[in-house]
Image: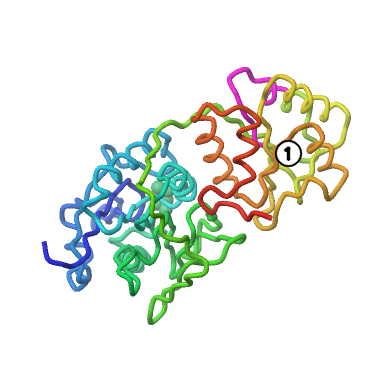
Amino acid sequence: MSDAPNILVIYTGGTIGMVEDPESKTLFPFDFEHLSGQIPELNKLDVNITTVTTHQPVDSSNMSPSLWRELVAIVSANYAMYDGFVILHGSDTMAYTASALSFLLENLAKPVILTGSQLPIGVIRTDGKENFITSVEIASAKNEFGDPMVPEVCVYFEYKLYRGNRTYKQSAEHFEAFASPNYPTLAEAGVHIRYFPNAIMGLSTEPLVTHQVLDERIGILFLFPGIGIDLVQSVLDNPNLKATILYTFGAGNAPSAPWFLRQVQQAVANDKILVNVTQCMSGTVNQSLYATGRELEKLGVISGADMTMEAALTKLMYLLGHGFEREEVKHYFGQSLRGELTEL
Ligand code: ASP
């Protein structure tokens, strides 16, 4: 290997790794051993690229905590040998994986860039090549002190680099598939790649700590006008759930009907951890703004602040995985552990 940066590319599945059979027009995954055959431009980059595939590449609708653990294990086993990591991933659940990895890789001091594409790499109008090539460049980029430019888990898509745990998938159609409404972009690729250091996480000086335990006993109760007691009860009373996200309106508001509040009260009394995340894509939960939100606060519902659903869900899995109970979850939920929320 030369002195050029060493980048490990991890393929997990998804559209980006597909090519089209010219005759049948069906998509099939290409052999990652022959990556530069698909993207000859990679040969022009002064980077040593090694590729590895997870044991079973999936459409990301089949992504799971066990696959997140596999990714953590791969990053951890190769951490000392590589300058950065690029994870090729289906876009559908990329924001969940990015959020989960941000919690599971504590004290991360190297770039972990997730990217994918809306069109397969083997299709003429693919967005995959640019996404991939720029992700490799970003994963290799160093500042004037020789430190990585972006030592955090990111999503790169369509000329923009985002903090991974601030993203959600916003479009099934446009190449600009992701958005991060509550946090600025970390970099933008035009003629040059422009980094925004004020938005980028500082370099951790502590050794990497990896986590593997996630507790999946979490429910999501999506509120809507007309929601009935049966549905609410079936989620809040479910003995297999330790925590539930109330997916609320606006600034964290929920119905104030006595039956609803009684259900919430009972769930809290039964040691369920309830968290308030807004259905709004931007802005924050503020449980003291309206009477309807204040009721939830009084009953012991924990505010999810301006976290995305994806970040709140994976953060809960991570905190419950530590065996934390209500008060500890509340304590850490209000804090930014990996830049996933804006502390007031
Ligand atoms: N369904 C695909 C997936 O998420 C879409 C994509 O690759 O972007 O794996």
Residue 24 position, x and y percent, is 26, 52
Q: Is residue 302 magenta?
A: no
The image shows residue 121, relative to residue 301, as above or below, that is below
Q: Which of 188/257 is in front?
A: 188
Q: Is residue 187 left or right of residue 260?
A: left
- Looking at the image, which residue is at 55% across and 26% down? 217
Quarter the N terminus occupies: bottom left
- Looking at the image, which residue is at 56% across and 36% down? 316
Q: Residue lying furthest left in this view? A: 1
The image shows residue 250, relative to residue 55, as above or below, that is below
Task: Give, as a three-letter code, the residue at label 1.
Answer: Leu
Q: Which of 53/271 is in front?
A: 271
Would residue 168 be visible to someone looking at this image? no
Q: Residue lying furthest bottom in this view? A: 191
Residue 147 position, x and y percent, is 33, 65
Which residue does the numbered mark 1 point to in the structure image? 223
Quarter the C terminus occupies: bottom right
Q: Is residue 34 left or right of residue 135?
A: left
Assess mark 1: CB under 8 A from ligand 1? no
The image shows residue 194, relative to residue 18, as above or below, that is below
Residue 286 position, x and y percent, is 76, 49
Would residue 129 be visible to someone looking at this image? yes
**Magenta segment, which residues?**
233-245
Colour scheme used in the picture? rainbow
Q: Is residue 237 magenta?
A: yes
Q: Which of 207/215 is in front?
A: 207
| Image quarter of residue 166 | bottom right
> Counting other residues with Cα less than 10 Å from the Cα at mark 1, is it few (<14), some (14-19), or many (20 or more)?
some
- Looking at the image, which residue is at 24% across and 47% down? 78
Residue 324 position, x and y percent, is 56, 29
| Image quarter of residue 157 | bottom left
Q: Is residue 194 left or right of residue 329?
A: left
